[in-house]
Amino acid sequence: MTASDFLSRSASRLEANGFAAERGAAFPMGDLSADLFARKSGRSLGVFFPYDDYYFFHDFSGRERETRVEMEALHEKARSYVNSLYRFPRWMRYRVPNVNTVAVSAGGFGIDCERYAHSIRRPAVGGEIHSVFLVDLLNRRMVSTGMEVTAAEMVAITFKQVNPHNRAHGLLMQLCAEFFGGGTAG
């Protein structure tokens, strides 16, 4: 059970779900690359809420001891690249990009990286959603901020397809569950 196996299975599954997936992707901006890059455009809630989902998968095997600073720099490069593709400033966007950095490791992650994955919050300005997910193959788990819940009139609602973070979380939980053959802690 290696990170390369996870990436190969994920690429196949993503392509089956309508994503354009590319192994060993390199980008024109700086030194940004991804072991697997996947992109999908669509609409949630019928004709409303157009979206672009971007996934930057990185094989972190052998890099498990990288710190929060290095993980954050990797994620910020992905965010910068995606935001450069849009002509409108973030506060004017109707189509909102969902930028996801997914680190996959056969040896687990340091506590600083896990804290960083838990610390990601929705930007106050809007016009972009971004998340960091850590797939820990050793412990058969995924680390993230978890599902976002919307409270309305004292009722908690979890929008699984309309909310971009929840859409990404659900997809990655599904990829992990299929790879691990059932359960995933996330």
Image (cartoon, grey):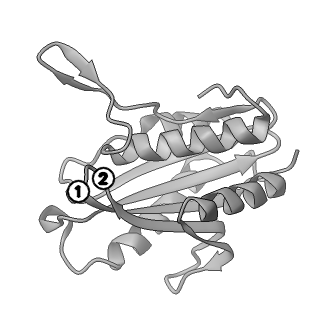
Instruction: Estimate how packed mark 2 is, as few (under 14), some (14 to 19) or many (20 or more) residues with alpha carbons within 10 Å.
Output: some
Instruction: Tell me where residue 59 sits by quadrant.
Output: bottom right
> Residue 81: x percent and y percent?
43, 74
Q: Secondary structure at mark 1?
A: loop
Outermost residue to the top: 154
Outermost residue to the bottom: 28
Location of the N terminus by quadrant is: top right
Is 142 in front, or is 171?
171
Q: Amino acid at mark 1?
A: Phe
| Residue indicated by mark 1 | 49
Instruction: Tell me where residue 182 sits by quadrant.
Output: top right
> Residue 16: x percent and y percent?
62, 61
Q: Secondary structure at mark 2?
A: loop
CB under 8 Å between callouts 1 and 2?
yes
Instruction: Estimate how packed mark 1 is, as few (under 14), some (14 to 19) or many (20 or more) residues with alpha carbons within 10 Å.
Output: some
Does 93 sit left or right of 99 as displayed? left
Residue at 67%, 28% (x, y): give it.
184
| Residue indicated by mark 2 | 44
Does 112 sit left or right of 155 as displayed? right
In the depicted structure, whether residue 95 falls above or below residue 121: below
> Residue 39: x percent and y percent?
50, 68
- Is residue 107 something one can see in this rendering? yes
Residue at 36%, 44% (x, y): give it.
161
Residue at 18%, 71% (x, y): give it.
89
- Is residue 109 something one can see in this rendering? no
The number of callouts visible is 2
Q: Amino acid at mark 2?
A: Ser
